[in-house]
Amino acid sequence: MFLVRRDRMAADLEDEMRLHVALRAESLQRAGVPEGEARVAARRRFGNRTTIQQESHDMWGMIGIEQLAQDVRFAMRGLTRRPAFTAVAVLSLAIGIGATTALFSATNALLFRPLPYAAPDELMKVTLVKPPRGDRPADDQSVWSYPKFLTFRAAQRVFSELALYGPDRFRVTSGEVESIGAESVSATYLRTLGIAPALGNDFDRELDTQFGVPGVAVLSYDYWVRRFNRDSLVIGKTIDLNRDPFVIIGVTPPGFRGLTGQADIFVPITVQPATRLTAQSHSFWLVARRAAGVATPLATAEVKRLGVVVNDAHPNDWDKAKWGAASEPLDNARVAPLVKRSVLVLFAAVALVLLITCANVANLLLGRARARQREMAIRFAMGANRTRVARLLLTEGLLLALLGGAGGVLVAWFGVRALASVNPATTLRVGQSGAVGAIAMSSISLDWVALGFAFGVALVIGAAFGLAPAIGVTHSSLADALKTGSSEAKRGAGRTLAGRRVLVIAEFALALVLLAGSGLMIRSLGKLLAVDTGFDGRDVLTVRLSVAGDTVKRESVPPLFTDVLERIAALPGVADASLNNCPPLGGACNSTNIRFLNRSEVDIANSPSVGVDWASPTWFATMHIPLKRGRIFSAADRAGTQQVVVVNEAAVRKFWPNEDPIGKHIELGMGGLKDAEVIGIVGDVRRRADSAATAGVYAPVYQSPFTDMTVFVRATVDPASLGGAVRRAIHAVAPSSVVSDMRPMRDRAADATARARFSAVLLTLFAFTALLLAAIGVYGVMSLAVATRTREIGIRIALGASGAHVQRLIVGEGAALVAIGGAVGVAGALATTRVLRALLFDLSPFDPGTYAGVVAVVAGAALVAIWIPARRASRVDPLAATRAD
Amino acid sequence: MLILSTLARSDALHGFEFAEAIQLASSDVLHLEEGSPYPALQRMLIKSWISGTWGRTAENGRARYYRLTPAGQRQFNREVADYTTVSAAIVRILRPA
């Protein structure tokens, strides 16, 4: 546009200069100079025309910049003159753009951005495949044991590097005592991922075969900053983990917390107790890097073949099932499907909010342009440049959008920090699935791509909404604008109003969709929290107790436990203490096969599976779990006496639907319980908040010792206050035991619902933002409607209509808009909330109660937003209205 | 400033008449190249201190007639005031103490 103008200006100037020279030549001729000479003289006196064109071009250029500065100043003044409008527009844009950008960053990091490792497409996740057994289907995501890994590594030829890793927790016992997350890894873990230490060295390759040597450790960068204050001399220092010294040999680069996303420190697998390093002790995940030139299908086929080799080298000693191996690119495993779905849902929600924001800003700007149309028309009549005015409006729109964009960057920055700080291990239940998504979560940062995205959106919005009224305004004529009664003006106003009405309908529809989603999530969360977990964990403190398995003989474990429990129970503030190896709501722990000794002979390997926990006699009382029938094992049931077990109601339903289990004898595949009598039935206890209890058997820990237990302490005071006393009591009796993960039971329960809470909170935030924006939108439209129809309203009142009648009229019009929007919204919600099905607990995506509630909320908000302008309409003074323009 | 003052004195001038007027007013002291006011005229045109309308000369040639605008008048007054202040200051400095 500017270029065309320049050409014209240049042409005009050329004409002028030519005329000037011609006139000078004429005057010279009149003075007597001959024609040819006159022309030459005239040209000479004029000067260099090219230079003049050049200078003028420069002028235009400078002017352009000056004018831009002036436009911006005018635009700023225009915006600050209406602070309410500006604030609302900028705020809604900032929230919309900021939230979208933050979630875009998260989505990018979690789902799209390549994993932050060297050549990430070469990395593969290798798993063991457990064949189907009894009623359990094949499991191809099974974890490795250390010896099997060594066999695999020795036999394989397709991977250049491979490593084992597994999550762990340690208690730091030197200096400030704290509990930290960790990973137990094989020697080439960091090398496999292509990560070089930022400080110090990596693990020695030979470490994998060295048992019992002094431990070494690599710190994560964040932990190095947090605990060691970036001490560059940390290499060589010692840190005590669970009383054992570890020499620090290196620090990882920033942002890396292991593939499990929760590791502050990395230790070699070889320091694990021997019991965890046996061939059948499966606890670790395997990550491998394909060698150069090896394609994925080749690797997959080779892995499958090697699965057989590994199984042959380490067969199960008590069943003949053939295990296999499988692999997939690491990228596929990066996020658990449920997490992927949650994130995408949130992103869609945010995009919807941004859409509503744009609709709102469009509405606001159109309204303003309409109001200023008369002002504009008069300006044009006075000679103002149309293009200049249009440019001014455009600048205003862009400025608004840029301010909103800048605010959006702020919002996005905070949003991204909040998202990145979410503890993945609890919120995403990483421990259960080994999802790689955890690392991506901690690497969420404000993407430059995202920022560009945000500003791009802002600019497009600003330009569109600034230009639209500008175009409309420059085409209007003065007469039309002044004559408000003219049909042309009315039609114009009507068109704008219609456009705005459509926008409001769209806003309400979108807000309703979001609210429906959030309402469903909230109700689902409510049901989740209200579910009967089967126990009472209030006032219970839990702490993990590991008795060193290789230094304490099995026979001495029961008395050890008895002593510990007696000591703790004797503490002031303690009502009761007991043991169980598997905390409720902590997921499944162990399962094994159950064989019924009174039924026909079935091989135990093919018998059905059942969950098995080890408990001390008073555990059920401590946790307020009801005894339904029979009795619970007591101190009398110990080594040497008849083995006994207690079953839960789910087990009764599954295995003894039509008979009485009490008195029956069973054999379990674990724990040395070859012939145990069922002596009692207890109530079901949930292992997961969102699924019903599974069939379970409780074995007495005094008959079947288990060295890795959790102590449950029921307190008469705040359980968290007993921490130190409990620790001391345990160490007084069992100084070599490891005490870790001390938490009140209620915290564990909260973790179980963390993800549902997180999603519900976020979605609700967005939904209410959307509703607020929609309410503002409808308020704006109704206000405009009232303002443009002031004269008509005045006439109506003059003719006898009451204020209340006018009010009802306006409310009715507004309500019609909202009703249409609501209907569209409900239809949209019904269509889209089905994607939430997987995330909802015990709730249908079409739950009528939720929809009814949401519609009520929307109606309420809309009514408030409409009532205010309606009241204004009822107060219109008929005389003033008919006189006004 | 000179351009503005020249325009302030007359109604509407086109480029040639303008150059003549300046020569006349300055009693031939200021002999600019005749084309030199044009870039300045362009600048003032864009700034809306003068307005330019295309019209016909007496000999029926197409010429752009320049007029001072109200904004231009204000700008002129400002510039005159500034110039007066500055020149008075200079005179004071030059006057023997």
Image (cartoon, rainbow, N blue to C red):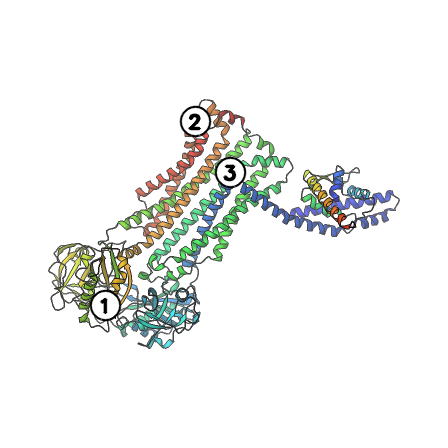
Foreground label between 2 and 3: 2
Is the residue marked by circle 3 packed among few (<14), some (14-19), or many (20+) residues within 10 Å? many
According to the image, label 3 marks what residue?
A367
Callout 3: helix, strand or loop? helix
Nearest the eye: B89 or A310? B89
Callout 2: helix, strand or loop? helix
First reached walking from the N terminus: tag 2 or tag 3:
3
Q: Horizontally, is A47 left or right of A871 in the view?
A: right
Q: Is residue A110 visible?
A: yes
Is the residue marked by circle 1 packed among few (<14), some (14-19), or many (20+) residues within 10 Å? few
According to the image, label 1 marks what residue?
A732
Q: Chain of mark 3?
A: A
Give, as a three-letter code, the residue at label 1.
Answer: Ala
Q: Position of residue A534 (x, y in %)?
A: 22, 53
First reached walking from the N terminus: tag 1 or tag 3:
3
Nearest the eye: A323 or A693? A693
Quadrant of the rendered structure where residue A436 is?
bottom left
Do the dots labelled 2 and 1 sit on one chain? Answer: yes
Q: Position of residue A576 (x, y in %)?
A: 19, 59
Q: Chain of mark 1?
A: A
Which residue is located at x 77 percent, y 42 percent?
B18
Give, as a three-letter code, the residue at label 3.
Answer: Gly
According to the image, label 2 marks what residue?
A803
Residue that protrudes farthest toward the front in the picture? B97
Callout 1: helix, strand or loop? helix
Q: Chain of mark 2?
A: A
Give, as a three-letter code, the residue at label 2.
Answer: Gly
Do the dots labelled 2 and 3 sit on one chain? Answer: yes
Nearest the eye: B80 or A857? B80
Which residue is located at x 36 percent, y 77 percent?
A206
Can you say which quadrant of the picture contains the C terminus of chain A? Answer: top right
